[in-house]
Image (cartoon, rainbow, N blue to C red):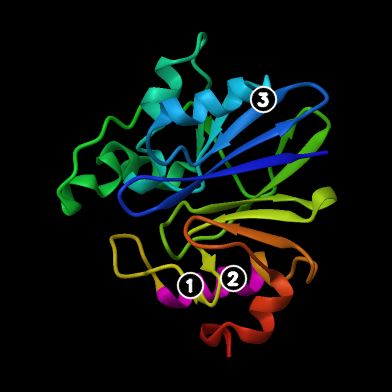
Amino acid sequence: MLQVVALTLGPVETNAYLIADPQSGDAAVIDPAWDGHLIVAEAQRHGWRIGNIWLTHAHFDHIGGAAAVADSLSPAPPVALHPEDAVLWRMQGGAPLFGFRIDPGPEPTVDLFHGQILRLGSNQIQVRHAPGHTRGHVIFSCAQERIAFCGDVIFQGSIGRTDLPGGDYDQLIESIRMQVLTLPDETRLLSGHGPETTVGVEKRLNPFLH
């Protein structure tokens, strides 16, 4: 079983996800967007232990709370990121372009790659490389729970922007077709911004996919 708590944080209302295996109490943070102390407090409220930070990509609004999460925990959890986004991470996720300065937190030490299986208690979570929004963007898919954490690849009725460095529209559409729409229609898509949706709904209604 996988429990999911969504927290909408930061200046552009980014969805951070605290996920846990309630039986073991093992937890991970997907995209600690901002206000890391709030994420840690939520884990403590549930009695969960945060053992990992997993990043869908390295834009500043998805990593802005990583430092505070790490500083609140001992030992600090390792950070996982696709190597293609390492340069973006070192640039504070592009924060200066938007007038922000952030501490990106601990340097990523776990390299994500396509097809990799991450484990959280009894849950297996597959990494799917889905470039187009950034070069190293990944999706975290938990098949047994029919949930996919999509970052900024796809949203309810929309898709990720491709006008920032490393963005590529054609590549993004191909990533959606190969890495999102191939999942079962009932799969819940938990995105980096906005409400959740499903694969089936986006197949039918997303105007960018027709």
Residue 57: give x, y in percent of width and height: 45, 48
Element type at mark 2: helix
Q: Is residue 156 left or right of residue 47?
A: left
Q: What residue is at 83 percent from the left and 25 percent from the top?
A: 23
Q: Is residue 173 magenta?
A: yes
Above or below, 78 against 11 in this view is above
- Disc 1 designates what residue? 159
Q: What residue is at 70 percent from the left and 71 percent from the top?
A: 199
Cα separation between marks 2 and 3: 34 Å
In terms of image quadrants, where is residue 190?
A: bottom right
- Disc 2 designates what residue? 176
Q: Earlier in the sequence, mark 2 or mark 3?
A: 3
Q: Which residues are magenta?
A: 169-178
Residue 107 visible in the picture: no
Residue 191: give x, y in percent of width and height: 55, 58
Q: Earlier in the sequence, mark 3 or mark 1?
A: 3
Numbered mark located on residue 46 in the image: 3
